[in-house]
Image: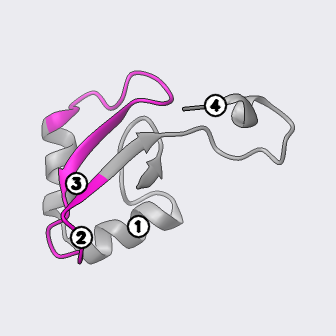
Amino acid sequence: MNSTAKNLVLGNGGVSKAILSGAGPEIQAECQQKAPNGLSQFGDIITTKAYKLSCKVVYHGAALQWDNGAGPAEKVST
């Protein structure tokens, strides 16, 4: 599971960068193909192949940046 920004730019954020680095650029291309305008709202997800990672798929979900409890991030639920 990759919690990422709605724009699905995997080069931003520690987890997304690690996934992009491990999987290769194909994973970013698949994100752009499946959601060319990004994800429309927080909580939305897409699934991509894992490419060079040692799993079969990666779930990319739009999540609010953690704000240490000062805002809406703790209200997002599944």
CB atoms of marks 2 and 1 within 8 Å: no
* Left or right: 74 as drawn, with respect to 30: right
Query: Circle 3 is placed at which residue position?
Result: 28
Q: Amino acid at mark 1?
A: Lys
Q: Position of residue 9 (x, y in %)?
A: 36, 49
Which is closer to the viewer, label 2 or label 1?
2
The reply to whether the C-beta atoms of the residues labelled 4 and 1 are less than 8 Å apart is no
Q: Residue sitting at 15 percent across and 51 percent down? A: 29
Q: Earlier in the sequence, mark 4 or mark 3?
A: 3
Distance, label 4 to label 3, CA atoms, is 25 Å
Q: Which residue is found at the position 12% from the left and 38% from the top?
A: 33
Q: Which residue is mark 4?
A: 76
Tell me which label, 3 or 2, sits earlier in the chain: 3
Q: Secondary structure at mark 1?
A: helix
Label 3 residue SS: helix
Identify residue for label 1.
17
Q: Residue at x 46, y 57 (%)?
A: 12
Q: Where, quadrant-wise, is the N terminus in this rendering?
A: bottom left
Q: Are marks 4 and 3 in contact (CB under 8 Å)?
A: no
| Label of residue 55 in the image | 2
Quadrant in which the C terminus is drawn: top right
Disc 2 to disc 1, how far (Cα)? 17 Å
Q: Is residue 55 magenta?
A: yes
Instruction: Assess disc 3: are there few (<14), some (14-19) or many (≥20) residues with their C-alpha within 10 Å of its C-alpha.
Output: some
